[in-house]
């Protein structure tokens, strides 16, 4: 595939992408190769001076290894750019307590992003709290999936056919503190409400506590005290939302 973004915050890149996947009942294995063939040079000089010509390769897997309540996933990505090679990887495991009311799910994820890793486009991936890690950290405070190690625990359960509740905990550990200390912890509490077959609403409250203020090498202006963020997301999908969408 060939992709082009008009997003100036991403320096409007063009990408060539090739992917190959093997799907089986026990899981999926895949490889992907990406080349950033072009960027808006004026924007890239300010934001991503090494993005043009950058090549990325990844190997990934996800499945249950034949155990219905088990979840396993992992990926390793490499970047080759003018300043050298960067990498990122994660391992995740989870368990669904399918015999309990609400079928609660517990996941643990460890990820590492090297000092100069460029996350390119990143979002929620499979679910909340996966590649896009931390509502406050990923949107406002850092580390923005670069120069960090992240430990993440997520729990979620259904309270009715249309409502799920969950919590996400993160511990961010900066790799190279000479580039800025963005050690922090975050707790997000949220709900998922499938209003009907097309509309869904997701309220969320995030609590973020950095280790350092900006004056002491961190990223939060003014102080290193607690930061509380709240938001409500509404979204509409063309195809009906399945009743067991929380387990996807």
Image (tube, rainbow, N blue to C red):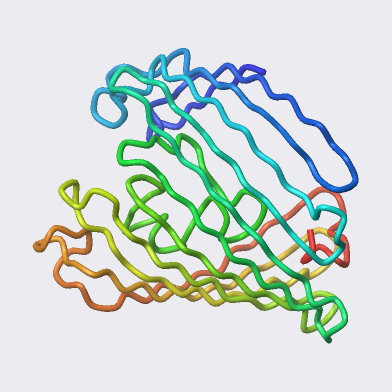
Left or right position of 89 against 70: left
1 up-or-down from 5: above or below = above
What residue occupies the far bottom of the structure in this picture? 101
42 up-or-down from 245: above or below = above
Along the viewing direction, whichever of 139 and 93 lies nearer the viewer: 93
Viewport quadrant of the N terminus: top right
Q: Residue at x 85, y 61 (%)?
A: 67
Image location (x, y in percent) of residue 36: 47, 19
Residue 106 location, quadrant = bottom right
Left or right position of 231 against 146: right
Viewport quadrant of the C terminus: bottom right
Q: Residue at x 55, y 47 (%)?
A: 123
Image location (x, y in percent) of residue 148: 35, 52
Image location (x, y in percent) of residue 146: 36, 45
Left or right position of 216 against 27: left
Along the viewing direction, whichever of 105 and 208 lies nearer the viewer: 105
Q: Residue at x 10, y 63 (%)?
A: 216
Q: Residue at x 35, y 57 (%)?
A: 140
Image location (x, y in percent) of residue 12: 43, 25
Q: How many marks?
A: 0
Residue 246 location, quadrant = bottom right
């Amino acid at each position: 595939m060939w992709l082009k973004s008009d997003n100036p915050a991403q320096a409007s890149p063009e990408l060539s992408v090739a992917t190959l996947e093997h799907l089986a009942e026990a899981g999926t294995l895949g490889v992907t190769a990406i080349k950033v063939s072009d960027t808006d040079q004026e924007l890239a000089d300010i934001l991503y001076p090494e993005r043009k010509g950058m090549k990325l390769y990844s190997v990934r897997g996800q499945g249950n290894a034949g155990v219905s309540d088990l979840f396993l996933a992992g990926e390793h990505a490499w970047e080759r750019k003018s300043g050298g090679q960067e990498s990122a990887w994660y391992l995740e495991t989870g368990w669904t307590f399918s015999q309990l009311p609400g079928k609660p799910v517990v996941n643990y994820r460890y990820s590492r992003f090297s000092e100069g890793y460029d996350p390119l486009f990143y979002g929620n991936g499979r679910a909340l709290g996966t590649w896009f890690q931390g509502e406050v950290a990923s949107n406002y405070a850092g580390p923005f999936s670069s120069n960090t190690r992240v430990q993440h625990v997520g729990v979620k359960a259904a309270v009715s056919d249309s409502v799920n509740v969950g919590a996400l905990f993160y511990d961010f550990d900066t790799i190279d503190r000479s580039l800025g200390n963005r050690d922090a912890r975050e707790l997000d509490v949220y709900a998922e409400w499938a209003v009907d077959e097309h509309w869904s609403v997701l309220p969320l409250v995030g609590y973020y506590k950095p280790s350092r203020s900006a004056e002491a090498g961190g990223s939060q202006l003014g102080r290193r005290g607690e930061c509380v963020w709240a938001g409500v997301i509404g979204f509409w999908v063309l195809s009906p939302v399945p009743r067991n969408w929380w387990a996807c």
